[in-house]
Image (tube, helix red, strand yellow):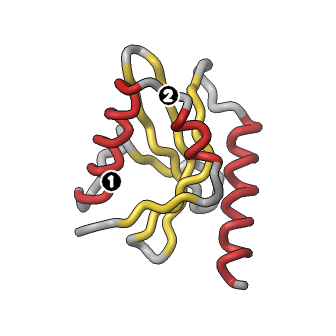
Amino acid sequence: MKRQIVFHGEYFIDFYKELDLGIKSKFKYVFELIRQVEIIPKKFLAPLKGYDGLFEIRIEYQSNIYRVFCCFDKGKLIVLFNGFQKKTQKTPKKEIEKAMKLKKEYFLTKKL
C-alpha cells in the first residue's frame, strides 16, 4: 500500500521550515510510515472526534508534542493542512478551526 501526501497551501511548509533537523527527521519517519503501512497506529495518526473527516498526525520528539491536521481524499491521498507545537493538554480550538476552514477550502478549490 502506498499513500501519497500532498500539501494544501503553504501552511504546513511554513511551519516545517521553522523546525530543527532532529524534529524534521522524526516528521520524515512518520510521513514514511503513513505512506507505507496499511494500518497506521493511532499513536501516529488519529481522527479528531466530532470533526468530520479531520485527522491529526501526532509526533513526539524530546518531550515536545507536534500536531499536523490532515484529511484523506480518495483513500490513498493525504492532504496536510496546518501544523503546530502543542503546549497544553487540550488541542487549541483556533488550530482546529483553521484546519476545518482549510479542509473546506481544499475541497471547494478542487471542484473548480
Quarter of the image with the N terminus is bottom left
Q: In the rendered image of this protein, does residue 111 appear above or below residue 88?
A: below
Which quadrant of the figure has residue 85? top right
Kind of residue at badge 1: Ile
Q: Residue furthest bottom?
A: 112
Q: Nearer the viewer, residue 43 or 69?
A: 69
Q: Which residue is mark 2?
A: 19
Q: In the rendered image of this protein, does residue 40 appear above or below residue 93?
A: below
Pointer 2 local density, CA inside 10 Å: few below 14, some 14–19, many at least 20: few
Q: Residue 47, percent across and down?
A: 50, 51
Question: Which residue: 41% across, 47% down?
Answer: 45
Q: Residue 9, percent across and down?
A: 65, 57
Q: Is residue 94 left or right of residue 78?
A: right
Q: CA distance from mark 1 to mark 2?
A: 20 Å
Q: Nearer the viewer, residue 18 or 78?
A: 18
Q: Which residue is mark 1?
A: 34
Q: Is residue 40 left or right of residue 57?
A: left
